[in-house]
Image (cartoon, rainbow, N blue to C red):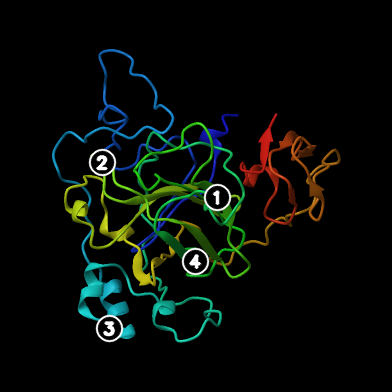
Amino acid sequence: MDREHDHRPGHAGRNRPRAGSVPRSTQGNTPEPTQDGTPENAPQSAPQPGPQPGSRPGPQPGPQSGPKAGISRKNLLKVAVAAVPLPMLFGGVALARDTRATDRPLVPTPYCDDGDDPTPPQIEGPYFKPDSPLRASLIEPGTQGVRLTVSGYVFGLTCRPIPHALLDFWQADADGAYDNTGFRLRGHQFTDARGAFRLTTIVPGLYPGRTRHLHVKVQAPNEPVLTTQLYFPGEPRNTTDPLFNSALLMNVRPAGPAREATFDFVLRVDQRPGPTPTPTGTPTGPGDTWAAGTDYRPGDRVTYGGAPYACLQAHTARAGWEPPAVPALWQRL
């Protein structure tokens, strides 16, 4: 099985992405530019070299137009309810936690209504790498740039939070370059029991043809992957980037010399009551060896559903992290 095409998360709606089954994404109207400025999926008369370590995409050709979603009824309601100043309309969607005076946990479904659309998908681009490290902070010794914290929730279609959802982030550095040899500014994490996540990173730099953005894949356990991108309000290049979608704007505010951002993903996951599901976390066949509560190390082998898997990342197994559901942790043999 191709792990890159069976990899991780994805989806946001009026501020979230949608999950798709990790085949290299072709969703979106305009491919992200590659190193030489050619759209990733455009026909070529001769093979083009792949991206080089630390390289930046070249200039973006083609018309300067694309999906720039308008302001939705829900966004207007959020602004009215939260009493957010009008400029917020053009800088992101007001979330319940943005106006809270304390750090107490949110109620289960802050401003998530049954009219929410799933987070729109966007293309993966040429710089995704599978098997990123399990970590919530992408800051390493020597990392330069303005510190950025992104927090939010992952919801399903009925506005219930999704625990143990997988989020895989990757981005350019402060100079607009991607690390294509290692895993600098790349990493994945899981939402907690409240469906919440928190990423510590830097504000990405600019490169020709694109506005500032973060890449992410989001996946609920046993569900398709949403591949999308998150954007910054107030960026001049938002109006010329053909991939920019205002439905994917984060709420961003200054925090001293750093910045804080919020964004909620809504995945296309049906959370309506249905038949009692088969319990997870237990072997499904007489020969299965995977079990919740077990500490696994890289290289350990298990069987699940009659298929063999090898462990990729050290972790303690839990229900919802069965091998087929989390390709970040398990590779099918």
Position of the C terminus, as image quadrant, is top right
Q: In the picture shown, does residue 97 fall above or below 49?
A: below
Residue carrying label 1: 141
Report the disc number at residue 80.
Answer: 3
Q: Alpha carbon of mark 3 to alpha carbon of mark 1: how far? A: 43 Å
> As rendered, which of 231 and 117 lies closer to the eye?
231
| Count of labels in the image | 4
Mark 1, other Cα within 10 Å: few <14 / some 14–19 / many ≥20: few
The tag earlier along the polypeptide, 1 or 2, is 2
Say which of 290 and 129 sits in front: 129
Whole-percent x and y of residue 323? 69, 43
Mark 4–mark 1 Cα distance, whole angstroms, equals 28 Å
Q: Which residue is mark 2?
A: 29
Q: Amino acid at mark 4?
A: Tyr
Expressed as whole percent of the image width and height from the top left, the position of residue 318 reads: 73, 56
Label 3: which secondary element: helix
Q: Which mark is residue 153?
A: 4
On-image quarter of the N terminus: top right
**Residue 142 in view, yes or no:** yes
Which residue occupies the extreme front position in the image? 142
Q: Earlier in the sequence, mark 4 or mark 3?
A: 3
Percent x, y of residue 57: 31, 34
Drawn side of residue 60 relative to residue 100, left or right: left
- Where residue 90 appears, x then y in whole percent? 22, 68
Between tags 4 and 1, which lies in front? 1
Disc number for residue 72? none
Q: Residues within 10 Å of mark 3 (few under 14, many from 20)?
A: few
Helix or strand or loop: what does disc 1 sit on? loop
